[in-house]
Amino acid sequence: MALAYTVVVHVIGIMGPGLPVLALRPWTVAFGHTVTQLVLGKAPAGRSALECPWLRAHTWIGTCSTFAAARFALLAPFTEWSFGQGPLLGATRMNQRASDRVHLITGGFPPGSTAGHDMEYARSRLLEMLDDAGPISTTVSDDFSDIEDFLPDCKLLVTYVAGPYPDAARCEVIEEWLRNGGRWLALHGTTGGKAARVPDSPRRKMVKLDHHKTLGSFFLNHPPLRQFSVAVADHPLTEGVQGPFDVMDELYLIELQDPDLQVLLTTVLEKDPSPDGFGFAYDEDTSLQADGKTRVLGYVRSVGEGSVIYYSLGHCHSVTTNVQPFVDESVDVAGTTPKVFRGAWETEAFEQLLQNAIAWSTAT
């Protein structure tokens, strides 16, 4: 059996991000093509990188395959191999462990829009927390369109979106990754997705799709920004979080899709206080729990060897991204929407929840 060595590289103009190639393959690429910079730490936005501190340099590949062989000689000592029984020539193809890489998706719909959220703020806060968590390399995208390129060697997927969602084929990719031990930290609008027009009405209604089953919940609506109290269950993911805690945020009404998930955060709200015509339409308030007053705001769901962690908290907007027409009087007596709103992001409880989720998901 031929010995197969696999080294992950990026060839600008030839290979897309995240596509592995064989290092022993005779390369006859023209001069002028470059290999992306190999960095230790964070990769450029939307790109992954081979994390090797001994090779922090730009590498040029010429027409002669000798260059490829020389490059392999440099990489081989730092590459992990998985060998089968028998002599060296009976070795199996490399079985690379999941790296300490995280993939972060933040964005609105249509692509490039903010969809009423301060995506830059949320992205920067999440990147800051990931940086504080230790030697974690992070790749960044604004939707799920290339998720299959980033998940195979990824430990954690973090999503803060308002509109983008994975289609059926990409849901299968995510589910397989979860079953094999991946972890998904899904925030706020990730339980949303597609909204369809209600006939003879200016309103829209959310459409239940494949990703809601994968996530474990489906977004119905939220009333105007308001203050509410959040109860906290005992779990390693909530360690250090003093509950109940008060927060100003969008109180999401979510319909659970998995009866076996473990609830982490709840609040009490007997009736949706949304004014007539506010937000999204829905036929029945299926987010209400059996006691007739409890709403689930966060949970963890097991999927094979992996898991999904979801927190509905996290609305934020800036002067240029705000679309909130008014707020509940618990936020402002006059109902005036704050020009800049950070809500849960400015609470110790939410920060601790995110830190715990990152640490728990990236632990070896």
Image: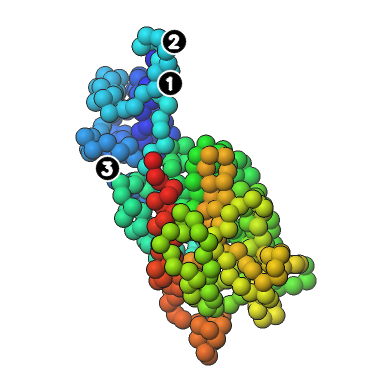
| Residue with the most extreme right position | 200
Q: Quadrant of the C terminus?
A: top left
Q: In the rendered image, which residue does mark 1 sit on?
A: 93
Q: In the rendered image, which residue does mark 2 sit on?
A: 1
**Type of amino acid under label 3:** Leu
Q: Position of residue 191 (x, y in %)?
A: 59, 58
Label 2 close to label 3 by CB (< 8 Å): no
Q: How many marks?
A: 3
Q: Earlier in the sequence, mark 3 or mark 1?
A: 3
Query: What's the distance in space between the residues labelled 2 and 3, CA to CA?
Result: 34 Å
**Type of amino acid under label 1:** Arg
How busy is the neighbourhood of tag 1: few (under 14 within 10 Å), some, or many (20 plus)? some
At x 42% / y 26%, what residue is drawn?
95
Q: Position of residue 327 (x, y in %)?
A: 55, 81
Q: In the rendered image, which residue does mark 3 sit on?
A: 40
Query: What's the distance in space between the residues labelled 1 and 2, CA to CA?
Result: 10 Å
Residue 48, quarter of the rendered image: top left
Q: Earlier in the sequence, mark 1 or mark 2?
A: 2
